[in-house]
Image (spheres, rainbow, N blue to C red):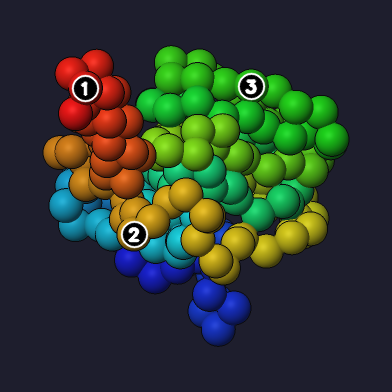
Amino acid sequence: MGNASHYDPTKKRMFVRGISGEYNLKHELERLRNLPRVVKSTSLQFTAGPQAFSKHYMEPEDGLGQTLHIHLEEYAPGGRSQMHGHVNEAVFYILDGRGYELHDGVRYDWKAGDVAIVHNNCVHQHTNADEHAPARALVIKTKPMYMFMNMLFQKRVTERPTEPTPTQGDFVPREDVDWSQPWHDHDHDHGHAHDHDHAHAHAHGE
């Protein structure tokens, strides 16, 4: 959780949180029981971009848990992630949009309602196949547990894109209250409106 980008090379990232104390860990248990049980989306911001944005709901540095990393991904129209690999598995529940995975060079298409599963040690990349609408996925992975067991290998093959796609315009990630509404690409819609007006005028001899 937090609002700092995980892709900022100047920021150190906490993969596993240290736990210390007396043997019965009484104070740690009390701390856990006093933590909030609901993470409010409004308390978080999307980071990174301009093609792939992330909002991190749960990870070890929050102190909420030690085994899961849960984050929301939003891909701009035509956007893609970095290509990378890690030992841990990951599950992507596709909330909306359509796109595809590249897993070790093999393409797997997905759409809203599907679940994309990234297997262990797979070099992969996530891509929004729609050049005029965003896509969104909830990601659940047990990376912290793998790290705790010294399964440490992970590497980026390419970095996240640093330039917008040709079709995304001034896209920014949708707030959660808005994401379930139909997406309107204003430039794309304007083009359709222009075509409609042109056809109407032609039909009436204007």
Image quadrant for the N terminus?
bottom left
Amino acid type of the residue tagged 1 in the rendering: Gly
Residue 31 image position (x, y, % from top left): 26, 56
Amino acid type of the residue tagged 3 in the rendering: Asp
In this rendering, the answer to whether 72 lies above or below 161 is: above
Furthest residue in direction right, as rendered: 105
Residue 166 image position (x, y, % from top left): 52, 54
Secondary structure state at the residue bearing disc 3: strand
Amino acid type of the residue tagged 2 in the rendering: Asp
Proximity of marks 1 and 3: CB atoms separated by less than 8 Å: no
State which tag comes first along the sequence, 3 or 2.
3
Would you name the residue on which mark 1 appears?
Answer: 205
State which tag comes first along the sequence, 1 or 3.
3
In this rendering, position of residue 109 left or right of residue 196: right
State which tag comes first along the sequence, 1 or 2.
2
Residue in the image at 67% along x and 64% along y: 159
Residue 78 shows in this picture: yes
The span from disc 1 to disc 3 (Cα, nearest Å) is 45 Å
Closest to the camera, between mark 1 and mark 2, is 1
The span from disc 1 to disc 2 (Cα, nearest Å) is 37 Å
Would you name the residue on which mark 2 appears?
Answer: 170
In this rendering, position of residue 107 left or right of residue 70: right
Closest to the camera, between mark 3 and mark 2, is 2
Q: Which mark is residue 110?
A: none
Closest to the camera, between mark 1 and mark 3, is 1
Residue in the image at 56% along x and 68% along y: 162
Would you name the residue on which mark 3 appears?
Answer: 109
Residue 175 image position (x, y, % from top left): 21, 47
> How many numbered circles are shown?
3
